[in-house]
């Protein structure tokens, strides 16, 4: 589905993303974890052709995302509120997104009816523009617009961050369902280790732009991650510094 | 504290993404201002000679006194259009231990740093020193200078007050400008009263009782205080964001756009953008104001009015939205530009939607100018030619510049402290838009081939309209080389 080759992004002499090789297969559910500044969002943005990498390429179905637009047909993503057109009502926004995928208003309405539980009565027919919604509700709109596109690849950046606990659980089961039953490839970043290990089969751990761990989720994964983020930090730092100087 | 604010503002200026562009604009502005300064200085130095020639039967002091009120009316009108509101992003300071008064004082005080406050002194002080000081003595001269200062102060803060109010409600600007125009017309068109007599009523008396100079000063101080209070009262986050979301916001559709498919959807979204955000809505309402420009310039009905003016005014009236709104493209969409990029929207459609939007609005404005047929068929024909020019060439030019605009506009933020719309700088950027038709028209008109000039303008417009798809391809190719930079600039809050 996705292949990354020698990808490198440098800001002011600091390498923020450095991924020599990464392959994500169709139907995988991949979680991305890492502290602030590890390069998660930057990696997402390069994968979505929003920023130009200094070197390397991102291939979606074997085609470079930069310079091609075919990936837009099967990729849905929500990174932040900057993806939403905030002066539209949620309905207008959904119709717009649906229209881009040749869906009629009626079919969009049908689809949204299925998300009633996820919306929890906060989104539709509230008479508000998206900009007047809270961050959590904006996130719901963003995620729902992704689902509406029937994507083969779904990319979400910290979807659990602003939403309430009930919605977090609903979102988790939605994501699992998409992956297991519809074969959607998920790529999700999060700071919530519990959620991410629950939803994803494979965890990528990023630090200073590099993917330092690539683990298939098992019962010990959560412990392993907690160790890294808790105590492990002090041990790994000196090692990293050496590697930085090597190249 | 004020010095800290100034330091922060300087940093904001130097560290902004658009610093290069801003500096270039400032240099051009500086040169223009210098030129204006020299002109006004010369005018000021020879004002007494000039008044003698223009009003040979009147005493020059009387003519001078009559002129002052008129000057300040024009001054106010110009300030409304050109003076910039001093801005400071106040939000980060509000929760800090910074006194509200010092914030507001800074905002109110820096407002004085406008060249508009320099002109009356350059223009009138030489005359006052040369004529009034010698005729009536130093004290009267001082009274005149103080009055001029007071009136400048008054105009300065009145203009800003109106502009701040107009930010929240574009109609206020329209009403204020219309009132000024009506006051002018009342004298020169309908002859209801004489502004010069009214002006002399006050300034003439100033010669006999110089203490009256306190009146304009008081007016100025009161206006300053009003401004101060208004700013202070509006220094709340809620009001800065001005979100009172009480009204139920319903979804709208424009069935007429449906036939254009995705392009229509995109254009529909942009129409909503214009109508649902204060700043962009002001740009549209401002356009309605320009519908009256013809009345100002065409003067008497009939075919005798200068056609050069009509080319200019016609372009303005049918294309003001393109200039005013297009100026800031694609910044209007900065807050969701990433979303547009990752969605299934081809840039060709995106551009087509812009063309569609401009065509719709320009057509509307052109239809609004049809009453100008009162000034003759030719007038309407010129308007139509300039309309073709606008939707042919100016749209393309505006989009070309849009590819070079990396500055974010945050529409969701309140407009009261965030006014980048109508200011002197904007007109500099629109200079190429306004000059190009003249490069074609003027040389021909000069040699009495105005008709050929108009024909060429019309033909060029039509050719550009017919070759739109070609220009869209060029713009698209251009965009692909710049889009990372644009997107990055727009992400940069």
Image (tube, rainbow, N blue to C red):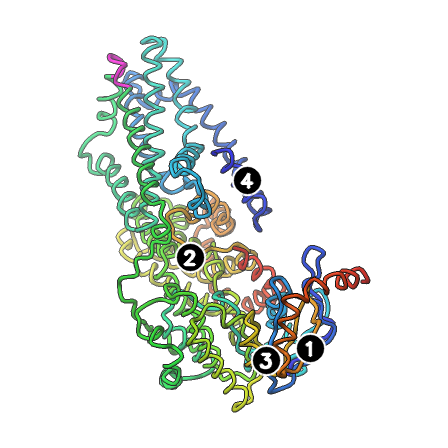
Residue drawn at x 42%, y 57% as measured from the top left: B411
Subunit ID for the residue under disc 4: B
Q: Quadrant of the C terminus of chain A?
A: bottom right
Q: Is there any visible trace of residue B377 in the rendered image?
A: yes
User: Which structural element holds mark 2?
Assistant: loop
Q: Nearer the viewer, residue B164 or A4?
A: A4
Task: Kindly report the distance in space between the C-alpha atoms of the residues bearing marks 3 and 2.
Answer: 31 Å
Other-residue count near label 4 (Cα within 10 Å), few / some / many at <14 / 14–19 / ≥20: few
Name the residue beneath numbered marker 1: A214
Q: Is residue B210 magenta?
A: yes
Instruction: Give coordinates of residue B412: x percent, y percent.
Output: 41, 58
Query: Residue B411 — which label?
Result: 2
Subunit ID for the residue under disc 3: A
Give the image quarter of residue B252. bottom left
User: Which structural element holds mark 1?
Assistant: strand
Q: Main secondary structure of the magenta part?
A: helix
Name above or below for residue B122 compared with residue B336.
above
Label 3 or label 2, whichever lies nearer to me, is 2
Q: Is residue B257 magenta?
A: no
Q: Respond whether the residues carrying marks 2 and 4 are from the same subunit.
A: yes
Name the residue beneath numbered marker 4: B10
User: Which structural element holds mark 3?
Assistant: helix
Instruction: Give coordinates of residue B129: x percent, y percent.
Output: 40, 14
């Amino acid at each position: 589905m996705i292949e990354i080759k020698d990808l490198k992004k440098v800001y002011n002499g600091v390498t923020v993303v450095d991924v020599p090789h990464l392959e994500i297969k169709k139907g995988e559910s991949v979680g991305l974890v890492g502290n602030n500044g590890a390069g998660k969002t930057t990696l997402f943005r390069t994968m979505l052709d929003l920023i130009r990498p200094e070197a390397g390429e991102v291939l979606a179905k074997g085609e470079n995302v930069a310079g091609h637009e075919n990936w837009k047909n099967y990729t849905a993503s929500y990174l932040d509120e900057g993806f939403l057109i905030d002066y539209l009502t949620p309905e207008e926004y959904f119709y717009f997104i649906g229209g881009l995928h040749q869906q009629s208003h009626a079919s969009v309405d049908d689809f949204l009816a299925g998300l009633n539980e996820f919306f929890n009565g906060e989104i539709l027919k509230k008479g508000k523009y998206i900009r007047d919604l809270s961050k959590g509700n904006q996130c719901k709109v963003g995620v729902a617009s992704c689902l509406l596109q029937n994507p083969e690849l779904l990319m979400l950046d910290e979807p659990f961050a602003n939403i309430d606990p009930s919605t977090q659980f609903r979102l988790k089961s939605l994501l699992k369902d998409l992956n297991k039953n519809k074969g959607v490839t998920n790529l999700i970043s999060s700071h919530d280790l519990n959620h991410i290990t629950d939803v994803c089969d494979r965890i990528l751990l990023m630090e200073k732009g590099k993917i330092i761990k690539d683990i298939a989720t098992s019962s010990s994964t959560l412990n392993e991650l907690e160790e890294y983020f808790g105590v492990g930090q002090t041990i790994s730092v000196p090692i990293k510094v050496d590697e930085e100087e090597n190249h | 504290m004020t010095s800290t604010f100034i330091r922060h503002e300087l940093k904001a200026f130097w560290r902004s993404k658009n610093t290069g562009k801003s500096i270039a604009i400032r240099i051009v502005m500086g040169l223009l201002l210098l030129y204006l300064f020299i002109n006004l200085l010369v005018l000021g130095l020879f004002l007494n000679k000039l008044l003698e020639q223009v009003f040979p039967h009147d005493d020059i002091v009387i003519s001078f006194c009559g002129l002052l009120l008129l000057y300040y009316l024009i001054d106010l009108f110009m300030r409304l259009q050109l003076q910039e509101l001093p801005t400071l992003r106040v939000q980060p300071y509000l929760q800090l231990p910074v006194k509200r008064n010092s914030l507001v004082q800074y905002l109110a005080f820096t407002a004085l740093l406008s060249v508009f406050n320099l002109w009356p002194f350059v223009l009138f002080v030489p005359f006052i020193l040369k004529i009034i000081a010698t005729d009536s003595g130093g004290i009267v001269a001082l009274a005149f200078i103080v009055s001029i200062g007071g009136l400048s102060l008054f105009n300065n803060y009145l203009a800003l007050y109106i502009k701040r109010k107009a930010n929240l409600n574009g109609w206020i600007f329209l009403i204020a400008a219309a009132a000024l125009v009506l006051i002018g017309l009342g004298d020169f068109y309908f002859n209801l009263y004489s502004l010069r007599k009214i002006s002399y009523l006050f300034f003439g008396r100033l010669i006999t009782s110089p203490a009256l100079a306190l009146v304009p000063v008081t007016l100025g101080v009161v206006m300053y205080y009003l401004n101060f209070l208004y700013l202070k009262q509006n220094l709340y986050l809620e009001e800065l964001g001005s979100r009172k979301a009480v009204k139920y916001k319903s979804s709208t559709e424009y069935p007429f756009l449906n036939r254009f498919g995705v392009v229509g959807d995109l254009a529909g979204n942009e129409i909503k953008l214009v109508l649902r955000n204060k700043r962009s809505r002001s740009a549209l309402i401002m356009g309605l104001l320009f519908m009256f420009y013809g009345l100002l310039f065409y003067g008497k009905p009939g075919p005798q009015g200068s056609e050069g003016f009509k080319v200019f005014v016609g372009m303005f009236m049918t294309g003001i939205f393109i200039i005013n709104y297009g100026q800031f493209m694609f910044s209007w969409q900065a807050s969701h530009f990433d979303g547009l990029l990752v969605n299934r929207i081809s840039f060709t459609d995106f551009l087509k939607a812009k063309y569609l939007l401009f065509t719709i609005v320009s057509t509307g404005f052109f239809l609004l100018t049809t009453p100008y047929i009162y000034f003759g068929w030719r007038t309407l024909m010129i308007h139509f030619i300039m309309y073709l020019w606008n939707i042919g060439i100016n749209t393309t030019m505006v989009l070309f510049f849009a590819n070079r605009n990396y500055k974010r506009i945050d529409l969701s933020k309140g407009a009261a402290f965030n006014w980048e719309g109508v200011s002197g700088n904007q007109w500099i950027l629109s200079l190429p838009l306004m000059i190009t038709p003249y490069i074609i028209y003027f040389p021909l008109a000069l040699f009495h081939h105005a008709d050929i000039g108009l024909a060429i303008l019309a033909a060029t417009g039509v050719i550009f309209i017919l070759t739109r798809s070609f220009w869209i391809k060029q713009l698209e190719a251009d965009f692909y080389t710049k889009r990372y930079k644009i997107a990055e600039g727009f992400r940069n809050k």
